[in-house]
Image (cartoon, helix red, strand yellow):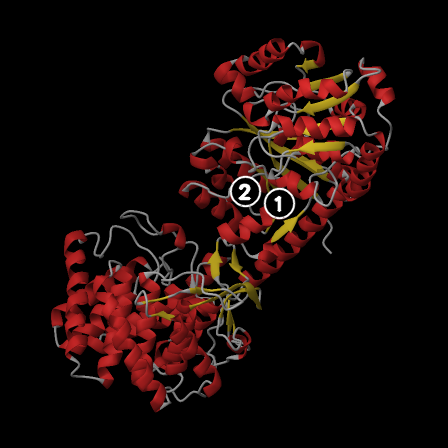
Amino acid sequence: MTRLRRVAFLGNSLPRRCGIATFTTDLQQAVAATGATSSTAIVAMTDDDHNYDYPPVVRLQVHDQKVEEYERAARFLNSEQFDVLSLQHEFGIFGGDAGSHVMTLLAGVDMPIVTTLHTVLATPSPVQRRVLREIVDVSTSVIVMAEKGRQLLRSEYDVPAAKIQIIPHGIPDCAFVAPEAAKLRRGFGGRAVILTFGLISPNKGIEIMIEAMPAILQSRPDAVYVVLGATHPNLVRREGETYRESLKKRTRDLGIEAHVVFLDQFVDQATLVDFISMCDVYATPYLNEAQMTSGTLAYSFGLGKAVVSTPYWHARELLAEGRGVLVPFGDSAAIGAEISALLTDDARREALRKVAYAHSRSMTWERTAERYLGTFEGAIDHHGKSVVRQKEEVPFESGRFPPRMRLSHFLSMCDDTGLFQHAIHCVPDRSHGYCVDDNARALLLACALNTLGEERLHEALTSVLAAFVQDAWNPDTRRFRNFMSFQRRWLEDSGSEDSHGRTLWALGECARNDANPSRRRWAAALFCEAAQSAEAFQSPRAWAFTLLGLEAFRVAFAQDARAIELQHLLAARLLSILSSVETQDWVWFEDGLSYDNARLPQALIVTGASVGEPHYGSAGLRTLRWLMTLQTAETGFFRPVGSQSFGDLRRYPRAFDQQPLEATASVSACLAAWRADGDPSWKVHAVRAFEWFLGGNDLALPLVDPETGSCCDGLHPGRVNENRGGESVVSYLLGLAEMRGLEGFAGIHAKPATLRALRTRVH
């Protein structure tokens, strides 16, 4: 394993008053204390125009609104040759929309990035979702502190499971002691002490605890509620001490001011530990469940305290299985009753303390630092391998293009229901089940393998794929359902228009080219029934997919009047939106680029040939030529429209994230264009698009394993996405099938000058 020498931490730092600052400082000190590194340093985020008396370990500060300081920090980190950057992420501590300025720094550093996410939003705004995805994509590993964080990253942000690690919030390693001595030191001897600490703000629910105190005093007249912590600096800037004063007023109104003590202090760790040690019950009455982690909860739990809390995410996990007491949000009666019960039952309270202390031993800062170090080591190893791969020669040797058709990974992604949607690395991910989109693509592959001199897909598997499509059809809604769970339960009554159109495309191809005559008749019948819904569609891509299916269907049923009518209708719609959007500089159907872009011009090209309308084909050729110009890098290799560009209005597409779907669509569209007008440059474009899979891309990294036929899910800044899901493998195999069937491909390999330029760019 690689020995770490220098570790940099990016986040807030003490003496700035906030939880991220405390965490960053504690983590840096814990890592340094292991002796596993020769040097650690903090790059501290500074808010507005504040200045803090940072300790020497803070080597550089970045004022959050000054973009040039993010650039300077990246240069500093590179010049100091840090081995890894540990990013502490919270949206509010970085400048720009949703903290987007931090990407300027992250995009400029050479070392691997390990990001700790202190917040994972369940319902992010579009810009928050985009920024978080960008941060995750440039990070080698992502750390969250609770299982809920992992679940949200998987379900809401589609982060690969292998990239996520759970490392609980660290805690000081303190002895398990009775509270009496600390009570005497702090002036609370002989009292039953309830404690809440942390920066004070309205979301902490302190008023709920104050409302509960009269009921607690009925059973324990000696009880005192200690609220330890300064008011949150952001709240002070906006409102001064209005909130704190409102809490004090409420204690006076209730006549309990002698039993509620406000200590307006931001204390160091030793003082904090002493305050926690004195309490009998620790309370976190937060008002919102969307709290991914709480350092105050972790510290109190780790010191062996009986905790009563509302069920926000972190508390729900940490206090599960009887390790604490959970009460409903905003329920002062419930929290009062539970605390009263604990304060009057010494045996129960002591048992709860022992359970908490025993469970928390794996959370000490020493253990936490060891887990972080292991993650840092793994990130460095992974980063080193990526650099080695970038320095390897791009695989364009004569005789190796195109590769042989290998189906082992595709077959491993199928079961007796159909093709799985996703994989974790190369292992099928059952948790996401299946979708008709991917199974329709797989049926397209089965048809493609019938005509290209390849070994056919096994009859039983082709039948499984067809059965999935049949079961997806919902006669009640006249639409195909899309998503199915692993338990074979449909998750919707109707899928998207795009998934319906893609399924029609597969059925059209099946009606034309399936090896089984009976299945061809099945496909034709279902196509005719399902195509009726396409007339009402509003999605341009659904129109395009349907047109591709109609072109194939009409090879088998040339005189079908309804099919011809629908071809004209949908092609005319594409021309109509093109005429309303196209300008001299923007030769496209929409104001922005999205996914599967090349399928729109391809649909017009093949439809023009099918129905004998040259103006359809000429519009398709014109838009495809413009698109391929955008998708050709300065040095000549194929650069598909990255998913970060989706939705951008009339701007040059951004490079990442690049997806296999785009390369395959471009291969197909360019070959359709070549067949339509005979221009050999289209074949060159097709080959370059396919070479993207083999390493002819921005990073000179292959996305496919030619021995198994697996394909990575995408190309991110600095790395490939190691997951190899259903859409990716079928996209690669469909592109490969077309290239293997292309006559004359041997004479149009990438030119040596282009390869030299590509290698120079990489090195």
Residue at horizontal 65 percent and vertical 46 percent from the top: 83
Classify residue 80 by image quadrant: top right
The percent position of residue 745, horizontal first and vertical second, equals 36, 80
Report, in whole angstroms, how far the alpha carbon at label 1 lies from the one at label 2: 9 Å
Crowdedness of circle 2 by 10 Å Cα count: few (<14), some, many (20+)?
many
> Could you say which is closer to the camera, residue 432 or residue 130?
432
Residue at horizontal 49 percent and vertical 23 percent from the top: 48
> Could you say which is closer to the camera, residue 675 or residue 56?
675
Q: Which mark is residue 496?
A: none
Can the viewer see residue 735 in this picture? no
Vertical side of 473 occupied by 204: above or below: above
Q: Amino acid at mark 2?
A: Val
Vertical side of 287 occupied by 514: above or below: below
Classify residue 186 by image quadrant: top right
Q: Amino acid at mark 1?
A: Val
> Could you say which is closer to the camera, residue 497 or residue 727?
497
Residue 170 left/right relative to 613: right
